[in-house]
Image: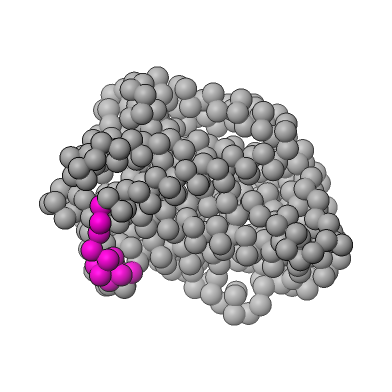
Amino acid sequence: MFSGWRSSRGDASLSDVHRSIAVRQKSSTWRRAAAFLGPGYLVAVGYMDPGNWATSIAGGSRFGYTLLVVALVSNIMAIVLQSLCARLAIASGRDLAQACRDAFPKPVGYVLWFLAEIAIIATDIAEVIGTAIGLNLIFGIPLELGVIITALDVFLILYLQKLGFRWVEALIVALLAVIAACFAVQIVLADPNWGDVVRGFAPTTEIVTNPEMLYLALGILGATVMPHNLYLHSGIVQTRDYGDTLPEKREALKFATIDSTVALMFALLVNASILILAAATFNVAGRTEIAELGEAHSLLAPMLGLAIAPTLFGIALLCCGINSTVTATLAGQIVMEGFLHIQLAPWLRRLITRVIAIVPAAGVTIWFGQSGTAQLLILTQVVLSLQLSFAVFPLVMFTADRRKMGDLVAPPWLVALAVLIALLIAGLNVKLLADFVLR
């Protein structure tokens, strides 16, 4: 589109639903804005997936409200980076994977593709385990069987995509509403010390100097700002038929940014609720070792005094798992098609990703039970954090390049903030590796 790109884009991102949702330019501003509601909530799902639950519960039970500031900072980072994803997609008509394929030599592109696949597999492992634990908590289904059942979600996704992309978004939003309602009730039951909650959003140097706290903080960061979400958002924004003129693109960028920002603030409320619930129940009672989702579930009833609390916890966890599998499917499709220019049927792409994720997840659940799954969940989030820089740096490079972006190039202040975020993420990851390799 612009001289900064070396070749034509090729097939559109998610070509079966590309530009499938109309934006009626002659309608009111509110109706045009409403047409963009949806992608942000698919992105927000990745910020509250089961892996996030494990790190937030471990952080809340171990260190109380201290790590709330990490959830807040991570969310601010997410808002900035996701706005850049929308900017890249709307300005260039490419998703992040397609942009990487064009900008870098083939060997570099293959390495970035491999790292993106590792991130998606790590995400999928967390979702497989989380959904299986949710099925176990609510219906008593053994974990091993629950892991296998999660593979069947491919049929749900295929059915919804046949009906139209709006149906996928409707499912996500409905399940998010259930999750929010479940946590609202649990927070009321837990009755946290709100003064301590507010103080938990204040920064402290202990997070960096304490290796255990940094490990969990990076897990929360990896579970919040997730690499696959950067690819996902740059693809699903293009499901809107927003037009090709510069004013239409500017308006599309404004509405898409509002959509993702509001959705991510909602995600922050859910993430903070998980950590607050763990701090108000487990940390206050001296149970600082809680990290397993199943153990947290079983302790909620005696600690909160109501049998409904663990049921609400299980329902919210299951909804999170189902939601996350839908978005991981789309992200996997975008990454494979964008980097390799290979288009597979969605059901085949999903099955390939699912099999790769189910093997380690099934192995851990069979051999170690829930204690093993808790450690694997936290590890997957740290892996995601370590992979993040390889998606963030290209994104910042592209959106700061006027030759690639044209008049929608990111303003200098936004580029500076994004560079600071990218360097902070990279620096924290180096610190994490140093602490655990040298200790």
Front in this rendered view, residue 222 or 191:
191
Residue lying at 64% horizontally and 26% vertically, measured from the top left? 348
Q: Tell me the quarter of the picture where residue 370 sits.
A: top left
Question: In this view of the protein, can residue 368 be seen by the observer?
Answer: yes
Query: Residue 145: x, y in percent?
Result: 40, 19
In this rendering, position of residue 209 left or right of residue 27 = left
Q: Is residue 306 above or below residue 218?
A: above
Residue 356 against residue 198 in the figure, above or below: above
Residue 251 location (% of width, % of height): 76, 67
Q: For the point 59% across and 75% down, which residue is it?
A: 414
Q: Quadrant of residue 313?
A: top left
Q: Which residues are magenta?
A: 190-201
Q: Quadrant of residue 212?
A: bottom left
At a point 67% along the width and 73% down the height, the residue shown is 410
Would residue 88 be seen by someone viewing this image from the given angle?
Answer: no
Asked if residue 101 lies in the magenta stretch, the reply is no
Viewport quadrant of the C terminus: bottom left
- Across and down, in percent, residue 168 comes to 64, 39
Task: Name the colour scheme.
Answer: one colour
Q: In the image, 64: left or right of 245?
A: left
- Report the residue at 73% width, 37% height from top: 164
Q: Quadrant of the N terminus?
A: bottom right
Q: Position of residue 402 (x, y in %)?
A: 74, 72
- Residue 10 vs residue 80, the one in the foreground: 80
- Residue at the farthest bottom position: 413
Determine whether 11 is above or below 154 in the image: below
The dominant secondary structure in magenta is helix
Tell whether 59 sits left or right of 161: left
In the foreground, 433 or 126: 126
